[in-house]
Amino acid sequence: MDAVVVGGGPAGATAAHTLATAGVSTMLLDKAGRIKPCGGAIPPRLIDDFAIPDHLLVAKVATARMVSPGRQRVDIPVGRDFVGMVDRGVFDEWLRVRATEAGAERVTGMFERFERRRDGGVDVTYRAGGSRQGESVTVTARYLIGADGALSAVARQAIPVAYRGTPRVTAYHEVIRSPAGDSEGYQARRADVYYDGRLSPDFYAWIFPHGPEASVGTGSLRAGFDVRAAVAALRREAGLENCETIRREGAPIPLRPLDWWDDARNVVVAGDAAGVVAPASGEGIFYAMTSGRCAAEAVQQALRTGKASKLAWARRRFMLAHGLVFGVLGVMQDTWYGNDDRRERFVTLCRDTDIQRLAFDGYTRKRLVFAKPLAHARIFLKNLGHLSGVLAPT
């Protein structure tokens, strides 16, 4: 076998699909039954880049509402595009099925460890059936892709130096039955984002519509912050406290790409295992799938040339395309999310139409968009004014 992919989320399923489509013999090893807590937002570029069919979109958001600590509300129209919403259980399974239809072998199992072989290959050991009580099985492959989440067992073993010290948000959401009609606190085509220290001291809380369901959640880097209590408070405020709770989910989410994604021998990582969740926004699906494709194409190069050094191409290609965006978003989070005064000023800035246009152009195209020089000058001066306290939040 040429490659084993551990993890069947968007990164792993995309990697397996990319490899199988290219004729690479691939096993997709996935622990069944896990759904990551996620708002489920996907931008138009993802839909185009990965040929996502319309029937997977459970909602199409036309407006984003920013809510400040003082309950200043700024509604930002998406513009000509829309933000698609997916149900992660259905969406992830569709990606896995697509990978198997392309030729990947799908196996349900729990990854345990890998060992390098003298012939240059790698032995991958897993528990069949996805539980620790399952039979221990070992398969041999030339390369291993770890797409097994933020607490990646593959990354911990293969690149422990890069893995340690990655900042992680504890994310929690409740999937609820959507209310029968729109209200001030909830609309079926509006995504609400709350910047409020009571709901998240250093990240944000959200209400995202998913058609018949909705995701209400929050996240924080701060140890001990009560995410469940914050979600309960948000549901009360939005008038959603009596909506049926379908399921509750929590997981760590990394907020910085690892410095290395490979061990220069057999292993490369992708998705949350590589730390590719955008700071400030927490967006992960597009970056997970893009990194999965990069990892798969790097493995193809390594197979074709016989050079394991080609694995490093995965991170280089990803960071060349998206590293600047990650850097800017990291500065934005550090600058504006630290306290409620800054958060209030940040939401005030979001009233600016130039900022709105830049934000959604950048979101839909997944790159920094350069506007007219005067617009950038106005944005810079407004940022400076709010950071210095010369301008007051309104």
Image (spheres, helix red, strand yellow):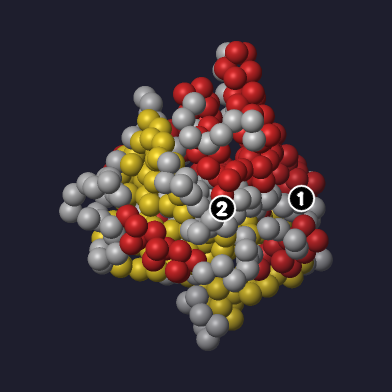
The mark closer to the camera, 1 or 2, is 2
User: Which residue is drawn at the image coordinates 64% and 24% (left, top)?
Assistant: 380
Q: Which mark is residue 213?
A: none
The residue pinned by badge 1 equals: 259
54 to 149, vertically: above or below: above
Q: Looking at the picture, which amino acid does disc 1 mark?
A: Asp
Q: Looking at the picture, which amino acid does disc 2 mark?
A: Phe
Q: Give the camera-side residue of 28 and 255.
A: 255
**In the rendered image, is residue 96 in sight?**
no
SS under mark 2 = loop
The residue pinned by badge 2 equals: 203
Q: Give the camera-side residue of 163 and 52.
A: 163
Q: Give the camera-side residue of 75 and 299.
A: 75
Mark positioned earlier in the residue sequence (1 or 2): 2
Query: In the image, is 303 to the left or to the right of 14?
Result: right
Query: In the image, is 166 to the left or to the right of 393?
Result: right
In x, y percent, where is residue 212?
24, 54
User: Which residue is drawn at the image coordinates 37% and 50% (left, top)?
Assistant: 208
In x, y percent, where is residue 370?
60, 20
For the residues labelled 1 and 2, the Cα–Cα distance comes to 23 Å
Q: Quadrant of residue 293?
A: top right
Query: In the image, is 339 to the left or to the right of 20?
Result: right
